[in-house]
Each structure stands twice: as C-alpha cells, then as structure tokens.
Image: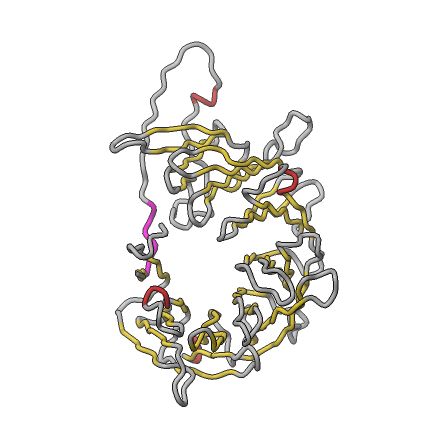
Amino acid sequence: MTRLTSYVPALSRLSLLLLSVGCGSRPAAFDSAFDPGVDTATPTDPSGKMQVRGLTGSVALLDPALNQVMMFTSPEPFALSTERLPVGRNVVQFTSSLDRQKLFVLSRGVTPRYKATDEAPQLRVFDGSSTPQELENFELQDPYDKLEIDPQGEWLIVHGSEGLVSNPNELILVHLGQSGATTTKLRSKTLDSYAGKPVRFTFTSRLAIPGATPRRLLVVQREKDLAIIDLEDLDAPEITVGLKQLANGDYASPLDVVFHDGITDEINPMLAVQLANDSDVYLLTINEGKDTTHALSLDPNLVDVGGVPSELDFVQTRKDGGLRLAALVPSKQVAKLIDPSSGRVLDVPLGAAFSKIRRITSEVSEKSGEDIALLYGESTNRIAFWHLGTTTGTPYRSIDAYTIGINVSQVFDIPTEQNADF
C-alpha cells in the first residue's frame, strides 16, 4: 500500500529529565548539561540538533560529552531501560542502516594525534535490536567525515579524508559481518584524481554478468566521469567511463545512475546515467570481460531524449521481457521510452509535467505481467497510473490520470499484512 504526501512532518521531540546524585570526585563531564550535538544529515529534524535514531528494537541518542550512545529499550509494557555504550571522540556521522537494524557511528578521534595513546579515528557498528550491543569496531588510519551506506546492508564506504595529506578519491570499503580478522574487512582503494572528487555512490544489486559469477558493482559518480568498482574483486582496477565534453570545454556531470539485471535472451545487465542539465542519456550495457584483469566490460550508447529528463527508471512492457528505459521530460509533458538494444526512442504524451516515477507493480498486482508506475511531481496537482503493457500502435497500455488538488513531493509505502517490512 502506498501513501502520498506533500510535506515531511517535523520530528516529534522527547524531553528527558535526567537526575543524578553522587558523592566524592567525578569527571566534570557528568556535571555538563546534556547536548545532543548537531546532525545536519537528518532531514526529518528541521532544527538539525537532535542526533537520535529510531531502530528496530531500540532508540539511540548520542551523548557527545561522555562519548557514549544511550540505547533506550522497552523490555515490557510501560517500562524503559537504558544502556550506555562507548563511541569515539568527535563523532561526525551518527546514522542507521536502511532497515534500521544497525547503528553506524563514525568518529575522528583526537586530531591531530601527537601521541600513540591519542584516540584514533573509528567506525563502530551497533545492533539496533531490543538487546543493543556493539557488533564491530574498526580503527582507521586517518580521520574521515563521510559515510555511504549500502541499501542491502553489505557494505559501507568511508571517505572524505582531512588528514595531513588529504585525498578525496581515497575510499575505505568496509565489508560488514564477515568472518576473519578486522583488517580483511577494510580495503582502501584510491581512484585517480583527473575527473574530480566523488559526489554520489550507487550500489547495484547482484547482477548476472555474462561469463562470470553474479556480482555487485559500486558506481562512483564523480565530477566528470564514472568509476565502476567490482565488489567481488577489489583487486581489479576500477573501470572509468568518461562523460561527454560540452561546447564550453567542460564535461557533463552525472546526476543519477539506475540499473537493471537484464533479461535472459533479450538484453544483458545495464546501467543508465542521467546527466546534469543535459538531454543526453548514457546507456551502458554490461558484457563479459575482454581481458584477465576484469570480469566485465561496458558498451556505451548516448541517446538524446529531446529535453532535460527529471528522472530515469527501467520498466518492463510485458511479462519477463520488453525492457525499456523510461525518461520523464516535464518541459515537454512527455515520457520517453528507450529500447536499450537499439537506442530507439518512443514518445508517450502524459498531459501534465510529471517529474517523478515510482514502480508500484507489486503493490497493485503481482500478476499484471508488465510494470505499473505511479507518476507525480511538485509542479502538478495530478497523479497518474501508467500501465506499461503494449497495445497495437502504442508503446503503453493506458495512462489513468487523477486530479488530487495538491502537489506531491514524496511517496511512502504503508506496511500491510502482505508487505510488513517495517
């Protein structure tokens, strides 16, 4: 079940009154007023001052004065239990996994370090269940301030070094939950710096690479190109995909990357790249490797969709086939359906400036055979249900539009008995 919203409500505030009684000497930190610090990465907290995370079985609240996280649980109705767990000094990232089962805390430690006893930068991973505990602790060589989280919970990317010799293209890849020594879970990979620093990261699902075992890819979107890392073989050099040069001499910048596992006997796995303020779309077909260094290769194709697209997504126009790349072009009030095998583009008139697309096939009908997508946007008070099945003379089955009187900026899933992931 899907819910529409045109706003994000402010995070409710919970006031906690903490009383303490003690005798004798104690650290001055215990007499300091509680300050949860600043968390500018939390979009649901307009004040940016509440470093709190709701997890699957607990609520985590950072106490930076004591370098601890307070884990609140409710062991029984109308009861509250608190456990304090240590975190590193100078926390810069306090966030959770997408499924809220784990809490990630990245700290810079003592900077700069003059003595061996000065605390090193750390990444700590905590269990967010009703029995919270520390799961993993990684000591880092340099302080970092950025953390990228794999939606599937397998990987973390630590980057944004500000050490004495800073390199924004150095990535620390952390493989979570793996057996063996801690050092085997941390891998440093330094990309060349010719194309600028990383700006976004995309983790693919496990793709059926021709001639190789299935594997996941990390697509690093940089200022002027893409760097593609094989997560199954971190020793393999990254594959660099240069982007088009513009008339003014600059290079196009990637804005978003979408992917698809391909369809047997129809098309190999694919990546599609949306460019900033550009009508061209990159299609990258993933083929088997051409040498012993890489397990895969990429075949690029540049397609002009006639206007700057607001969003891309892969859709299927028939059961188990008919793969197309859908590109919404609000300025033309159309969607473009691109055949990835030929590059042919078909126009689909929409009748409104829809800027967002969300596949809702499984929520509506798992047996529909083709995809069903919800179209919406902040520049229109209409929504539409787009049935992608083909009929004679049209590249789609139907578009059912409805005026709802509000603009829609976000779409959330509401769990049901059939879909109770959260």
* Horizontal relation, residue 69 to residue 261: left or right: left
Name the one closer to the observer, 242 or 45.
242
Q: Main secondary structure of the magenta part?
A: loop
Name the one closer to the observer, 33 or 376.
376
How many numbered circles are shown? 0
Q: Is residue 201 above or below residue 53?
A: below
Q: Is residue 18 above or below residue 297?
A: above
Quarter location, residue 52: top left
**Furthest residue in direction bottom, as rendered:** 393
Q: Position of residue 252 (x, y in %)?
A: 61, 69
**Furthest residue in direction top, as rendered:** 24
Q: Residue at x 36, y 16 (%)?
A: 21
Name the one closer to the observer, 240 or 377.
240
Question: What segment carries the magenta color?
Answer: 6-11
Q: Is residue 177 above or below residue 321?
A: above
Q: Position of residue 78 (x, y in %)?
A: 25, 32
Q: Quadrant of the N terminus?
A: bottom left
Q: Residue at x 34, y 54 (%)?
A: 8
Q: Position of residue 248 (x, y in %)?
A: 66, 73
Task: Inspect the magenta stretch and tell me whether residue 153 lies in it.
Answer: no
* Horizontal relation, residue 187 to residue 44: left or right: right
Quarter location, residue 194: bottom right
